[in-house]
Amino acid sequence: MKKWFLVGISLLLILAVAGCSKDKSVSSDGKQMITMWVHVSDDSEEGKVYKKRVDAFNKKYASKNVKAKIDFIPRSGNGGGYEDKVNAALTTDTLPDVITLDGPNTAAYAKSGIIAPLDDYVKDQDDLLPSIKQQGTYKDKLYAIGASESSVGIYYNKKMLQEAGVNLNTLPTVDNPWTWDQFIALCKTLKEKYNKPAIDMQLQSKDEMLTYALTPFVWSAGGEILSKDGTKAEGVFNKKPSVEAMTFIQTMLKEGYTTRTPVKQAFETEKYPMKFSGVWTVTDMETNFQKVDYGVMPYPVSPKTKKLVSPSGSWQFAMTQKSENKEWSAKLVDWMTNKDSNLELSRTIAALPVRYSSEKVLTKEFSDQMNVFMKQLKKSGHARPVTPAYPQVTRAFQQTIDDISFYDQNKNIKKVLDTRATEMQAAIDKANR
């Protein structure tokens, strides 16, 4: 009796597991489910667009035996939450078919076997901007496609510059950017006029913003963070161009043109005449600070190379290695990043397009400020380094900025770079074993 009881319990457990498995992979109307996780909440503007596009996907393929399902797993304040759940699902083999991931995570996720190449399924890659392909490619294979693009520029208060005697018609453009020396001269004028820092460069940030916004100065000087194959930091990051870029940033601090302790929202409240920030600040200005008359100018460039370089990259869609239906998973990735999805997202959250086809449409709709970002991105967008050791590399770069910010203690910039390059190299060597 006891034996049959145990057998009965075992059968019930097997049926329960089978039932759970069926519930996970098959929709209530009997269709194969393609599951997708995104890093935003369902009530955010970005989340609403994703939900709308998934609904459109299901409507488009209503006659097929598949159905897409989206789960919203917002990131927490410190960047965890979503990534924690992805990592946990990896250990329990419960990843969905499609996930979102931040651009710099491409190499680590690809090397770890979390995501799968898209090349066999997504054939139309010529429409993607080069920066998007660069961000989503690891070892010559496309693993992820960006949902939107972004960039950073210099916001300036038109009234404050004019009152300081600056002729706005002489300000730099994407086609004719200023050198670091010219930009420092502008900062000097503004500091003398207002007796305050001329610009908030967000140097107080201790996160990805430092790497995202400040690496273009190294690239403009002709330097690199890592070698092209991503295997070397020593002898690359600690070379002369990086010293020149860090010297420019340190000069901005030493002369008081920027600060590590800025007044909160100093630009938005017209206390500082300039702010170094991303394209996302346009939405904030248009929503919360409508009375501020502002413009955007491109990155200043190295006096030696005069090469304009700007940051690029944002969150992407990718299919997982675990997916048992890669054809439809890849089709969902392609759908979430196609022209229509890209137009809808860009119009909703003021993000930059990832495709040439959507860029042609949005250029006619964008404000002057947005078009500066778009033109700068198209001409000079540069993705962050692609390496499985990116978390350690970006941390070492951020620490470099922190070190040189204390210029009284770290006058020897080359020594700082040597130390941080060694840290990067150790992480890269470990990741590539």
Image (cartoon, rainbow, N blue to C red):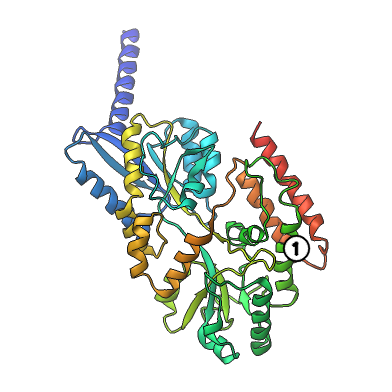
Q: Please determine whether, in this image, residue 368 is positioned above or below residue 10.
A: below
Callout 1: 10 Å neighbours few (<14), some, many (20+)? many
Which residue does the image show at 70% across and 65% down from the upper left? 304
Which residue does the image show at 55% across and 40% down from the upper left? 107
Residue 420: give x, y in percent of width and height.
74, 51
Frontmost residue, 5 versus 36: 36
Is residue 125 toward the left or the right of residue 389 in the image?
left
Can I make out residue 250 in this image? yes
Which residue does the image show at 31% across and 36% down from the upper left? 328
Residue 248 in which image quadrant: bottom right
All told, the count of numbered labels is 1
Can I make out residue 43 in this image? no
Is residue 184 toward the left or the right of residue 344 in the image?
right
Which residue does the image show at 55% across and 80% down from the upper left? 171
The residue that label 1 is drawn on is 404
Residue 428: give x, y in percent of width and height.
67, 40
Which residue type does callout 1 highlight? Ile
Frontmost residue, 431 versus 215: 215
Residue 112: give x, y in percent of width and height.
54, 34
The quarter of the rendered structure image containing the C terminus is: top right
Frontmost residue, 155 versus 391: 155
Q: Please determine whether, in this image, residue 303 is positioned above or below residue 228.
A: below
Residue 363 in which image quadrant: bottom left
Q: Please determine whether, in this image, residue 244 is positioned above or below residue 392.
A: below
The quarter of the rendered structure image containing the N terminus is: top left
Residue 274 in which image quadrant: bottom right
Residue 302: give x, y in percent of width and height.
67, 66
